[in-house]
Amino acid sequence: MVPYWLSRTQLLLDDEKVTNLMSKHVLVVGLGGVGGICAEMIARAGVGKMTIVDADTVDLSNCNRQIPALHSTAGKPKASVMAERLKDINPNLQLIILEEYLKEPRTKEVLESDHFDYAVDCIDTLSPKVFFIKNCVEMGIPIVSSLGAGGKVDPLQVTITDIAETKQCNLAKYVRKKLNKLGLRSGVTVVFSP
């Protein structure tokens, strides 16, 4: 049965699609400017299970762009703040919270720890980002990766494409270069702003 708070989504989609969303598990890594809003919208869409990963704490300089950043949350772990918010949106959400930076050996452990229907990469450090993308692709986990948009002010420039089609984005260039060295040239959906 679809819960009442998803009734507007139910009107947009249908019972079967909403029920399908409720059965999915999404992994969101990085809860900053992009990851925080992604996690929130995933919860609001009705996804039934989510794993969120971030080791950072809220800084007041984040207040202009990050969902967990408020004066009342300064100094608190972003993952804990987001967890509280997500559970307030959907109290039935099965939520796994990892307050850690995903580095190479741990990335594989996390990806193998559960079945993920989708992964969202909002990592802002190059090597962990590349390693995460590579492992998701190798394990057959559908992934979308957030690339460069920092300092950009025109939302009409936001582009969704394959990593091979990115241009005029330094982060995309470096990610593409490292992935190419690992034999991965395409097949990764990315969001960026040229």
Image (cartoon, rainbow, N blue to C red):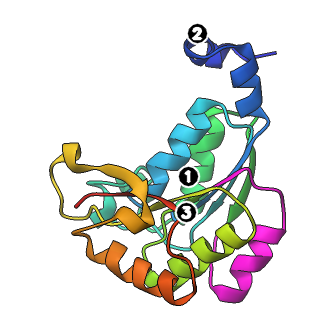
- How far apart are the two marked residues, 2 and 3, measured between alpha carbons? 33 Å
Dot 1 or dot 3: first in sequence order is 1
As drawn, 144 above or below 124: above
As drawn, 48 above or below 80: above
- The x and y percentages for residue 94 are 78, 44
Magenta segment boundaries in residue numbering: 99-119
Quarter of the picture containing the C terminus is bottom left
Q: Amino acid at mark 1?
A: Met
Q: Which residue is mark 3?
A: 187
Quarter of the picture containing the N terminus is top right
As drawn, 7 above or below 175: above
Quick check: 12 left or right of 172? right
Residue 11, located in which quarter of the rendered image? Answer: top right
- Residue at horizontal 63 percent and vertical 19 percent from the top: 6
Disc number placed over residue 110 in the picture, else none = none
SS of the residue at dot 2?
A: helix
Mark 2 vs mark 3: give the one in front: 3
Q: Amino acid at mark 3?
A: Gly
- Of 194 and 25, nearer the camera is 194
- How far apart are the two marked residues, 1 and 3, measured between alpha carbons? 30 Å
- The x and y percentages for residue 141 are 70, 60
- The x and y percentages for residue 29 are 58, 64
Q: Would residue 110 be counted in the magenta stretch?
A: yes
Q: Which residue is mark 2?
A: 11
Q: Which residue is mark 1?
A: 82
- Of 153 and 165, nearer the camera is 165
Q: Would residue 32 be counted in the magenta stretch?
A: no
Q: Amino acid at mark 2?
A: Leu
Dot 2 or dot 3: first in sequence order is 2
Quick check: 153 left or right of 149? left
